[in-house]
Amino acid sequence: MPKARKFEYVPRYYDAEKEEREERRKKHSTSQEATLEGTKLRISQNLRDSRKARLSASSRAARRYNMLLLGIMAILGVMTFLFIQYYLPYLVKSWF
């Protein structure tokens, strides 16, 4: 009878902060040397950082807009409720 095959699986963990730290260290070590690779790394890092900044700014603007919209809808809902509570009995009497 054949034996089951065993796999040597080692789970991996991705740490984004650690990766960013290593990239910064690499950037600083290569930025001292005026090499082409250091320049490429610096440019790609700056582009990545500017993209993150734009995305966070747009998400803050969207969150602000959504909160404003929610506030306006709540105020209109309360005003509609109060209008119905106050004027509905008068409207029903005048119609019938």
Image: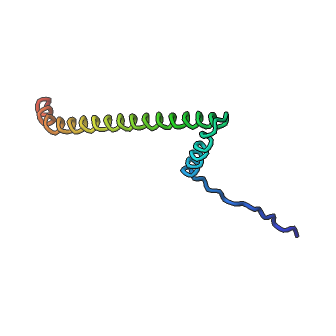
Number of numbered discs overlaid on the protein picture: 0
Along the line of sight, which residue is nearer the eye, 59 or 31? Answer: 31
Q: Quadrant of residue 65?
A: top left
Position above or below: 32 against 17? above
Check the picture and name the quadrant holding the C terminus: top left
Q: Quadrant of residue 33?
A: top right
Q: In the depicted view, which residue is nearer to us: 54 or 96?
A: 54
Where in the figure is residue 18, as x and y percent of width and height?
57, 52
In the rendered view, how is the structure colored? Answer: rainbow
**In the displayed image of the protein, which residue is found farthest to the bottom?**
1
In the rendered view of the protein, which quadrant contains the N terminus?
bottom right
Residue plotted at (59% across, 33% down): 43
Task: Residue 81 in the image: state x and y as whole percent.
Answer: 21, 39
Residue drawn at 16 percent across, 39 percent down: 85
Q: Where is residue 56, by image quadrant?
A: top left
Extreme residue toward the top, this view: 95
User: Looking at this view, is 15 or 96 the one in front?
Assistant: 15
**Residue 16: x percent and y percent?**
56, 49
Q: Is residue 71 left or right of residue 58?
A: left
What residue do we see at 67% from left, 36% from top?
37
Q: Residue at x 60, y 53 (%)?
A: 14
Q: Position of residue 26 (x, y in %)?
A: 61, 45
